[in-house]
Amino acid sequence: MSNLVIIPTYKEKENIESIIRTIALLNTKFDVLIIDDNSPDGTSDIVKNLQTSFPNLHLMERPGKMGLGTAYIAGFKYALENGYSFIFEMDADFSHDPRDLERLFKACNEDGADVAIGSRYISGVNVVNWPLSRVLMSYFASIYVRIITGMRIKDTTAGFKCYKREVLESIHPDHIKSVGYGFQIEMKFTAWKLGYNIVEIPIIFTDRRLGASKMTGGIFNEALWGVLGMKLRSIFRKYPKK
């Protein structure tokens, strides 16, 4: 049984060493795969230097910014090819507390979940240091997604998750059409349509302290409009239940 944490990066030199060292100190063993999109600030060089001290640290370098979804799909393929049992998504900027990896792992390994989501909204609104406008945009986007899709998931755009291996095998990540943040919604929607048990684990989301945010209004609009296309495509697709 093995665990892989996938962390896409672009210009994360301020955070990358700290996040790797913090994960390495957890009681549960996690391998880490950094997928770097040719960061001009030397993020990948920092990872390469750390690999001599952390044998469970892996690096995938890509030629440029190719989208969050494609980064995770590359990571999922790597995980499946290398026999990992539990596959995690998280950000590099400490907006997700690395200690919560163990809670997501417990949900899937012990408590019967197929997908565990680190949820900002399952127990109220647990977001720190975001401007109110961004909190409202994120919160109401999740409501919009629930209305369109029929899912009951509170945090539909969450990017902190654990998948059992069989879920990714069934989803076939290459079939996912979304590239940006809509990718997070489409992965949840597909797992839900396939009948997998999805649970939300309450977390506190803290906006980054170092580095620059990659979120823009355009990215969020892409996710919102993409939901309609995703829902329409689902009408013509068969989802064999697990």
Image (cartoon, rainbow, N blue to C red):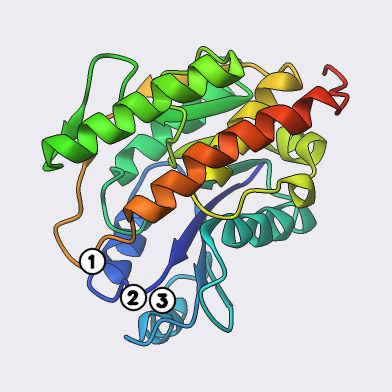
Q: Are marks 1 and 2 in contact (CB under 8 Å)?
A: yes
Mark 3 vs mark 1: which is more N-terminal? 3
Q: Is residue 104 above or below residue 176?
A: above
Looking at the rendered structure, the kind of residue marked 2 is Lys
Q: Residues within 10 Å of mark 1 (few under 14, many from 20)?
A: few
Tell me the mark number nearer the camera, choosing from 3 and 1.
1
| Left or right position of 1 against 170 | left
Disc 2 designates what residue? 11
- Please name whichever residue, 116 or 85, is drawn nearer the observer in this view of the structure: 116
* Residue drawn where x is 67% and y is 62% of the image: 74
* Residue drawn where x is 26% and y is 66% of the image: 15
Q: Is residue 47 above or below residue 28?
A: below
- The N terminus appears in which quarter of the rendering? top right
**Residue 90 locus on image (x, y percent):** 43, 49
Looking at the rendered structure, the kind of residue marked 3 is Ser
Give SS at disc 2. loop
Give the alpha-carbon distance from disc 3 to disc 1, as whole Å.
28 Å
Disc 3 designates what residue? 53
Answer with the quarter of the image where residue 40 lies: bottom left
Disc 1 designates what residue? 212
* Residue drawn where x is 40% and y is 31% of the image: 118
Looking at the rendered structure, the kind of residue marked 1 is Ala
